[in-house]
Each structure stands twice: as C-alpha cells, then as structure tokens.
Image: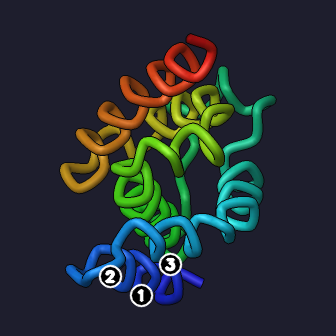
Amino acid sequence: RSKVIFALRKFCDRRTDLPQARKENIAKIHKEVIDHLEKLFPAQALDKSSSMVLDADSTDFAVNAVMLLSTLCKSAKVMHEYFAGIHDLLLRMSQTQLGALDSTREKLHWLKERIPMAKTSEAG
C-alpha cells in the first residue's frame, strides 16, 4: 500500500507536458487514500492522538500519503475539488508522531494552512 502511494506521488510529480492533467487523474483515488487515513487516525482518537503510536507499515503509508497529498494540493483545482474537507484529519495527524517527523511536519503544516484557503477562495 505504501509503495503504491509512493509510486503515484513520483508519477504525478514528474515533469511532462501535461502535469496538471496527470494530477487530476491521480487525484481521483483520493477517496481511498483519505479513507485509509481516517481509519488510521479516527476522529474519536483526537484527544488520545498524541499518545497514538503507529506500527512501521502504517507510519510508512501515512508518510507517503502526506507526501502524495502535498504534491496533489499544489494544484488549486485538485485541492478545491478533492481535499477541502480534510482539515480535521490533518489536525489529528499532526498531533501524532507524524507531527514530529522531519519528513512530514512541514508538509502537514503547509497542508493545514492551504486547505482552509481552498475552502475560503472556493466560496468567493
């Protein structure tokens, strides 16, 4: 699962003539990625999430999912269309070990800052 997410991220981050179309096509799998993340970081675990410890496979998947989301959300269209409702999930994730890892801390912060802007600018 983690290797697939990593491969998709690398695929959509490659430079080509049609990077926007590629990101939009890959973003169509967003529901599955978000569903897996919701299972790893359930809403009822929000108060306990700082003590939540993921196993190595789940951590690897979550890190690659964060990287994929940050790559996809470089596109305002993709962000508006697919990810405007994940701010609470990002908050839960950042309160776990993912918020402390060098590889994900800044990406989660960037996503949390950007996602509300997408919701606001979509309304305006």
Q: Nearer the viewer, residue 74 or 19?
A: 19
Residue found at x 27% / y 81%: 17
Q: Amino acid at mark 3?
A: Ile
Horizontal arrangement in the rendering, residue 77 relative to residue 89 (left or right): left
Identify which amino acid the numbered label 1 is placed on. Answer: Ala
- Residue at point 46%, 82% (across, down): 8
Sooner in the amino-acid sequence: mark 3 or mark 2: 3
Q: Quadrant of the C terminus?
A: top right
Cα distance between the residues tagged 1 and 2:
5 Å
Which residue does the numbered mark 2 point to in the structure image? 10
Q: Position of residue 84 (x, y in %)?
A: 62, 33
Give the image quarter of residue 32: bottom right
Residue drawn at 67 percent across, 26 percent down: 46
- How crowded pointer 1 is (Cα within 10 Å; few <14, some 14-19, many 20+) is rated as few
Give the structural element (helix, strand or loop) at label 3. helix
* Badge count: 3
Q: Amino acid at mark 2?
A: Lys
On residue 41, which mark appears?
none
How far apart marks 3 and 2 lie (CA) works out to 9 Å
Mark 3 closeness class: few <14, some 14–19, many ≥20 residues within 10 Å:
many
- Locate residue 14 relative to residue 56 in the image: left or right: left
User: Does the residue at mark 1 contact the one at mark 2 (Cβ under 8 Å)?
Assistant: yes
The numbered dot on residue 7 is 1
What residue is disc 3 on?
Answer: 5
* Residue occupying image coordinates x 37% and y 39%: 108
CB contact under 8 Å: marks 1 and 3:
yes
| In this view, 30 is above or below 48 | below
Q: Secondary structure at mark 1?
A: helix
Left or right of residue 58, residue 59 in this image: left
* Left or right of residue 110: residue 58: right
Q: Quadrant of the N terminus?
A: bottom right
